Amino acid sequence: MFNSPWTTPLMRPLFVVGAAALLAAGSCSAQSDSRHDAAPVLSASESSSSSVTFVADNPSGSSSSSDAALPSAPSASGAAAAGQAGGQSRGLAHHLAFEAGAGASAPAGGTQKDYITWGFNFTAGGGYRFNQHLSAMLEYQFLDNKLPGTIIAETGANGGYTHIWSFTVDPVVDLFPKSTNDLYVTGGGGFYRKLTDFTDPQETLYCDFYFCGPVVVNQVVGHFSSNQGGWNIGGGFTHRMGGIYGDGRMKLFAEVRYLDVLTPAVNHLQPNGLSATTVAAGTKLIPITLGVRF
């Protein structure tokens, strides 16, 4: 038989040691390759929370399904714009102001009592509330006052009255707007029209469903009118109504104003053939009004 030197008793231990060394080296190499292959998997899972790292690992540049399922956070500018739009839509209605009231109308005294007496007034308006303290109102006012007997007798008529209507711009300043009971001052000016009518009882024909016949009514037999500017100033008291926390919009108000209508003087005027009459310039009244505001 052929005798190999690896089969001698001296070489056998060396052969066994060498084989063991080769097996150990192969095992280490296999484990190193296994770790190298597993590294990208761990990196991908660990970096899934970062979209920048994950896209870099994906050559195609497409995002993962988990990233696509997450909604994008709203931008700060978009949220702010939405909040401002909601505030403006609510704020416009909140800034609108309305009022309506009625009451007496008195002569301011002095010579006014010679050609105008007590009467009635109606006031309505709307405007814009700039803040808790300041509002601007566009007001319509109608005043119906009787004429004194001396003026009526001077013309030869049997009765008479004065109608004044106006459109004015009137700022309103609330002194204690957060209180249930508040005080305010107001005043302004604008356009005024004054009509003075004289009446006599006249017979006329009147008919309704049950009756038709002659009746006697007061009819206008003479008048004069004027268009001019005017101004007013005054103040009032308000009491807030409603609201769970005392913050309701409705308020009851009571106010007094001084009104000066800049009417021209009437000197020896004969209205529609009546006797000549004379009225001093200017019409000064004190409207006293009760009403409601929003």
Image: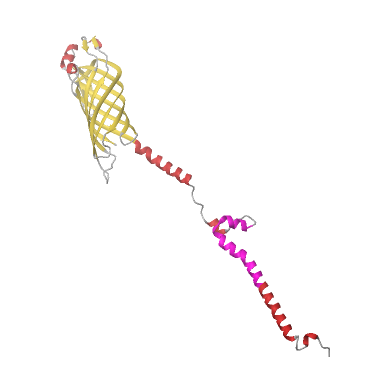
Farthest bottom residue?
1
| Position of residue 138 in the picture relative to residue 11 (left or right) | left
- What segment is highlighted magenta in the picture? 30-58
Report which quarter residue 166 is drawn in: top left
- Point out the image quarter for the C terminus: top left
Residue 204, x across and y down, in percent: 22, 19
**In the rendered structure, does residue 57 fall within the stretch colored magenta?**
yes
As drawn, 213 above or below 8:
above
- Viewer can see residue 269: no
Front-most of residues 209 and 195: 195
Residue 143, x across and y down, in percent: 24, 24
Report which quarter residue 102 is drawn in: top left
Residue 67, x across and y down, in percent: 55, 57
- Point out the image quarter for the N terminus: bottom right
As drawn, 74 above or below 276:
below
| Position of residue 142 in the picture relative to residue 149 (left or right) | right
Predominant SS along the magenta part: helix
As drawn, 114 above or below 16:
above
| Position of residue 212 in the picture relative to residue 24 (left or right) | left
Farthest right residue?
1
**In the rendered structure, does residue 127 fall within the stretch colored magenta?**
no
Q: What residue is rendered at 69% in x and 80% in y?
A: 20
Colour scheme in the image?
secondary structure
Residue 113, x across and y down, in percent: 17, 18
Q: What residue is rendered at 71% in x and 83% in y?
A: 16
Front-most of residues 126 and 19: 19
